[in-house]
Image: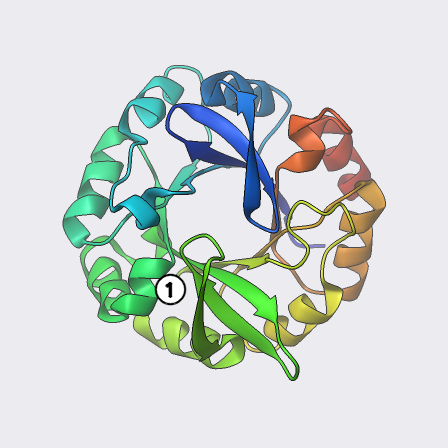
Amino acid sequence: MKYFRVIPRLDIKGNNLIKSINLEGLRKIGDPNFYAKKYYEEGADEILYVDCVASLYGRNSLNDIIQKSLKDIYVPITVGGGIRTVENVEEMLNCGADKVAINTAAVNNPSLINNIANKYGSSTVVVSIEAKKNDKDWEVYTNNGRDKTGINVKNWIQDIQTRGAGEILLTSVDREGTKKGFDIDLYLEMNKLCNVPLIASGGMGNINDSIELLKKTKIDAIAIADILHYNREKLSTIKESIDLF
């Protein structure tokens, strides 16, 4: 089996780690650096930081958090939220991030994907997609799941790959924070279109959910939050179970 990554997802508001359900109803968890260090020590393959209100307020406040993380964490760090320009990317990379995740800005200005990939390489660009099911298919949402775009997820995945996306972080808004398991149908469909690594996010309630995802799809990684933040499973236990699969 190919190497499968387990990535703790830390959604940030201000200086606090938070958690939501369906990307709404934010609840404060604690100090993000404490949790990032904890997950690193338990074997995280990468760490994902997302400023969940950055696009809404037109800023990214993760600089200090990322710089503090570097003292204790020695795995790749991806930063998302409020990144709108190549200059924003440079700032995050200078703070110590290895990759950036873009969603709202990519939808508003798709050429941003090209520009980042051309300057820093595709391996730097993670395009984040917030997908919500409609009557016939899945639609792309922006601004942390608040705004409809009218863009079909399948069409968007094909477009962003031609522009230089190095990875795709696909979050099921319908499952996010619900503990009902991953949206298998969503990842089965999108796997067919992906020529780059696909990261699943949203819905993991227990270890069996990750095993089911692995059995039924060709997903490359999972980005998980609730199951870790509320101590329902240790990250090391999740990784051990996946290794045994």
In the rendered image, which quarter is residue 218 located in? Answer: bottom right
Circle 1 SS class = loop
**Amino acid type indicated by mark 1:** Ala
Q: Position of residue 145 (x, y in %)?
A: 49, 57
Residue 194 seen in render: no
Residue 99 seen in render: yes
Disc 1 marks which residue?
165
Q: Position of residue 102 (x, y in %)?
A: 35, 55
Position of 180 with respect to 60 (left or right) is: right
Q: Residue at x 49, y 65 (%)?
A: 196
Position of 98 with respect to 90 (left or right) is: right
Q: Position of residue 28 (x, y in %)?
A: 54, 26
Q: Residue at x 23, y 64 (%)?
A: 112
Q: Residue at x 62, y 80 (%)?
A: 137
Q: Position of residue 119 (x, y in %)?
A: 18, 57
- Furthest residue in direction bottom, as rendered: 136
Residue 188 to residue 34: above or below: below
